Amino acid sequence: MVIAGDGPARTATRTRPPARSTGSSGDEVFARRVARRARTMVSERYGWATIAAHTASSYAAARREHDTFQARRAASRLAAGRARIVIPEGNLLTAGPAAC
């Protein structure tokens, strides 16, 4: 295909065949084949069976790695020098001083 314009002629390639004025059984066969492949791909990637398998795998990994995660988190908190929690003396449920 040649595109007219200023300067030398430019060429462009077509990415698909030109549309036909009448329907073709070959086009319908191709469209159905593409649709079937797309449906299969979507079902395999995003179907409930795949989602359930990924969820179960994630939960299993979380169970396996729980102790390691807790140890790393504790070590990180110790390294960060967390502030000490101070609990005041007295009855914490009242605003006044403790009654003895």
Image (cartoon, grey):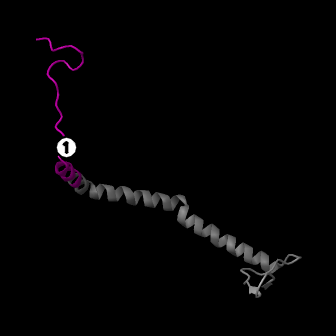
| Count of numbered circles in the view | 1
Relative to 3, 61 lies left or right: left
Q: Residue at x 85, y 78 (%)?
A: 20
Q: Quadrant of the N terminus?
A: bottom right
Q: Position of residue 75 (x, y in %)?
A: 18, 53
Is 81 placed above or below 61 here? Answer: above
Q: Position of residue 37 (x, y in %)?
A: 64, 73
| Residue carrying label 1 | 82
Question: Is 64 or 18 nearer to us in this picture?
Answer: 18
Answer with the quarter of the image where residue 59 lies: bottom left
Q: Quadrant of the C terminus?
A: top left
Residue range corresponding to the magenta coloring: 72-100
Q: Residue furthest left?
A: 100
**SS category of the residue bearing label 1:** loop
Question: Is 42 or 96 nearer to us in this picture?
Answer: 96
Is 69 placed above or below 96 here? Answer: below
Q: Residue at x 14, y 11 (%)?
A: 99
Relative to 20, 97 lies left or right: left
